[in-house]
């Protein structure tokens, strides 16, 4: 057999390079942001359902579903809404993070849905878990980042604040009214809207659209009303909410989510650890390697 000496020489020279690259340790860039998809684009794995009037886990009429990679709040199997307010809650709690969501409203509202719920949904943050909600509880005790769509005519901001069972502080004053409007533009029609919420434990919430801050507030805490039939023994009036669960709301108008991503801002803040990230703002020594 005739050997091609040129090819053999090239192969011999390449072997040390291949071996050398395999032996190199994995590199860790502390500046690279590790975003995590809470919605996997396929199914409702890691999410728990709670609808008013039903036990946790009962997905009445497939209110929450995934179709062609889109997470839907859908009422096409309903005859009437009948105050079946609901929430889809992620199973893992978080305290310090940035949450990126893409949403859009679709179709028409159910005929008996309340007027205020037209093109209305929300991101329920620092929420109680689905399992801790009572059967006839209408909303979770939480901080609601209210999502609103326009009617094609009037101004109607989105990324507002609503406070089911909670209060917040703005400019040093305790705010006890249920909802506070943001300074956002109005989004009419069925176009996708991209929003980001920065949550810093019990310190601060910041609402952003396209990089612009449209609302911020501090000291989320237990208080106020607007939640029926909840277990009051779970909460202490005035208690600061340092963390909790993330939920997607259902309030009688169909809505779709195609992105629910999270960047955890709590982690190892020891720069000598491979788990260290420069963007962490809250230390969790338990995850340091």
Image (tube, grey):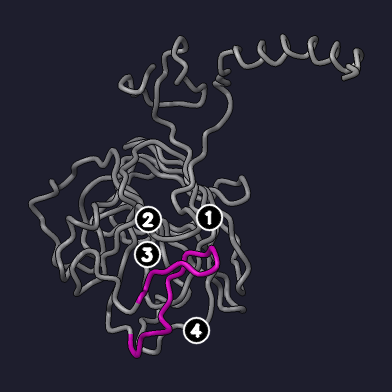
**Marks 4 and 2: which is nearer the front?**
2
**Label 4 to label 2, Cα distance in Å?**
28 Å
Q: How many marks?
A: 4
**Label 2 to label 3, Cα distance in Å?**
17 Å
Specify few, some or many for label 2: CA neighbours under 10 Å numbering under 14, 14-19, or 20 or more: few
**Label 4 to label 1, Cα distance in Å?**
22 Å
Magenta segment boundaries in residue numbering: 62-80
Q: Who comes first in sequence, dot 3 or dot 4?
A: 4
**Marks 2 and 3: which is nearer the front?**
2
In the structure shown, which secondary structural element does the residue marked by tag 3 occupy?
strand
Query: Which of the 4 quarters of the picture holds residue 23?
Result: top right
Q: Which mark is residue 45?
A: 2
| Residue 65 lies in the magenta stretch | yes
Q: Who comes first in sequence, dot 4 or dot 1?
A: 4
- Residue ID at (16%, 71%): 136
Left or right, residue 100 beside residue 245:
right
Specify few, some or many for label 1: CA neighbours under 10 Å numbering under 14, 14-19, or 20 or more: many
**Outermost residue, left side:** 233
Q: Who comes first in sequence, dot 1 or dot 2?
A: 2
**Label 3 to label 4, Cα distance in Å?**
17 Å
| Viewer-closest of 64 and 269 | 64
| Residue 246 lies in the magenta stretch | no
- Asked if 167 appears above or below 250 in the picture, the reply is above
Which residue carries the number 4 mark?
108
Q: Which mark is residue 259?
A: 1
- Residue ID at (34%, 38%): 95
Which residue carries the number 3 mark?
249
| Viewer-closest of 23 and 176 | 23
In the structure shown, which secondary structural element does the residue marked by tag 4 occupy?
loop
Percent of width and height locating residue 143: 33, 52
């Amino acid at each position: 057999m005739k050997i091609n000496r040129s090819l053999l020489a090239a192969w011999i020279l390449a072997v040390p390079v291949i071996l050398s690259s395999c032996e190199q340790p994995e590199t860790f860039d502390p500046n690279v942001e590790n975003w995590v998809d809470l919605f996997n684009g396929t199914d409702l794995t890691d999410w728990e359902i709670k609808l008013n009037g039903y036990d946790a886990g009962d997905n009445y009429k497939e209110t929450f579903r995934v179709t062609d990679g889109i997470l839907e709040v859908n009422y096409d199997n309903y005859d009437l809404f009948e105050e079946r307010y609901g929430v889809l809650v992620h199973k893992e709690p978080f305290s310090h993070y940035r949450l990126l969501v893409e949403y859009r409203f679709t179709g028409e509202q159910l005929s008996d849905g309340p007027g205020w719920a037209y093109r209305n949904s929300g991101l329920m943050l620092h929420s109680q878990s689905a399992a801790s909600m009572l059967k006839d509880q209408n909303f979770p005790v939480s901080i609601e980042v209210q999502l609103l769509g326009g009617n094609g005519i009037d101004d109607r901001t989105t990324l507002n604040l609503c406070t089911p069972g909670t209060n917040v502080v703005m400019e040093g004053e305790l705010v006890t009214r249920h909802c506070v409007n943001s300074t956002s533009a109005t989004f009419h029609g069925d176009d996708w809207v991209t929003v980001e919420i920065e949550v810093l434990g019990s310190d601060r919430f910041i609402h952003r659209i396209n990089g612009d801050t449209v609302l911020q507030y501090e000291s989320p805490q237990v208080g106020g009303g607007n939640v029926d039939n909840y277990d009051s023994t779970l909460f202490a009036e005035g208690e600061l909410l340092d963390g909790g669960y993330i939920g997607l709301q259902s309030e009688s108008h169909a809505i779709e989510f195609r992105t629910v991503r999270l960047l955890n801002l709590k982690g190892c803040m020891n720069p000598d650890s491979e788990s260290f990230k420069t963007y962490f703002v809250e230390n969790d020594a338990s995850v340091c390697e």
